Each structure stands twice: as C-alpha cells, then as structure tokens.
Amino acid sequence: MSGSVDEERISAELKGNTLRVYLYILKSSSNVGVREVQRALDFSSPTLAVYHLDKLVGLGLVEKKHGDYELVKEVKIGVLKQFVRIGAVLLPRYVFYATLFTTLLILYIVYLLGFERVSLSSIFALIFGVLGIITSWYETIKAWREKT
C-alpha cells in the first residue's frame, strides 16, 4: 500500500518545472549542479532551481551529494510511461514500431517492384502498411510533444 501512496504523491508533484528538472537529470550522464540546472532550463534564479531540486529530493528521486544532485530512482509516471531510456536518450516507445513498419513497407515495395503485375492482395497489403506507418508515427510524435 505504501508503494501506491508514494506513486500517487510523485504523480501529483512531478509536473511543470519539477518534471523539466527531473527530465534534465534523467538525460544527464553525471551529477548536476544548481547553476547547471538554472542555465540549462533558463530559470530566473538559482533559488528556483534549488526549490525544484529539493522537491525531487523530498520525493526520493534525487539525492544531494557534495553540493551536486544525483538521480537515485527512475519512475514511469504520467507521460514518462510512454518513453524508454537508452543511455542518456529518452525515446518514445512507439518509435520502435514506427521504424519497424516503415522498414517492412519499404522492403515490401522493393519486393513488389521486382514483379510486373500487382495483385489486389498486394494493394491491400500496401494500404495496411501505410495505415500502420501513419498511426505509429502519429503516436510517436504525439508522445514526443507531450514530454516537452
């Protein structure tokens, strides 16, 4: 029960600039300092950066060590559920499906070009392939825009 309470609290507080700071730390390959966060996120003062960093410390997501802040817990809440972290890069989950469908359709078109006659079934396959590509790229772009 404690886990769901923590998750609800994190979900409620991890929004706006606090989410931006968390995403910045998540993408960072090392510990971050207050001034670094202030400059990177264009905050008006270091105090504002400290406020959001301390909020993340209070949520148990970040730990303060020797004046720098370090990510200690990665959470998948809200818009973050739609992303996969590969190193320091956050990618929408749908980008893998979109890439797969696009590659398969290109290979299918190359395969069809080798034949002189196009059948009705190949036209339906092309239509479904194009619909799959449109849907998966739409979801990828939508998730990317929700993050920022």
Image (tube, rainbow, N blue to C red):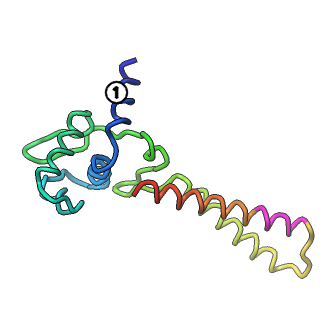
Q: Which residue is mark 1?
A: 6
Which quadrant would residue 56 be assigned to in this image? top left
- Above or below: residue 140 compared with residue 109: above
**Which residue is most to the bottom?**
116
**Observer-nearest residue: 47 or 103?**
47
Q: Position of residue 69 (x, y in %)?
A: 17, 46
Q: What stretch of residues is rendered in magenta? A: 121-128
Residue at 78% x, 74% y is: 111
Rendered location of residue 139, percent (x, y): 58, 56
From the top left corner, tell me how far across and down residue 119 is, in percent: 92, 71
Q: Main secondary structure of the magenta part?
A: helix
**Quadrant (top left/top right/bottom left/bottom right) for the C terminus:** bottom left
Does 2 lie within the magenta span? no
Q: Residue at x 7, y 44 (%)?
A: 66
The residue at the far front in this view is 44
Q: Position of residue 26 (x, y in %)?
A: 31, 50
Where residue 41 sits, quadrant-wise, is: bottom left
- Under mark 1, the amino acid is Asp
Is 10 displayed left or right of 142 in the figure?
Answer: left
Residue drawn at x 38%, y 30% as measured from the top left: 7
**Considering the numbered disc 1 on the image, is that residue within a helix, a strand or a loop?**
helix
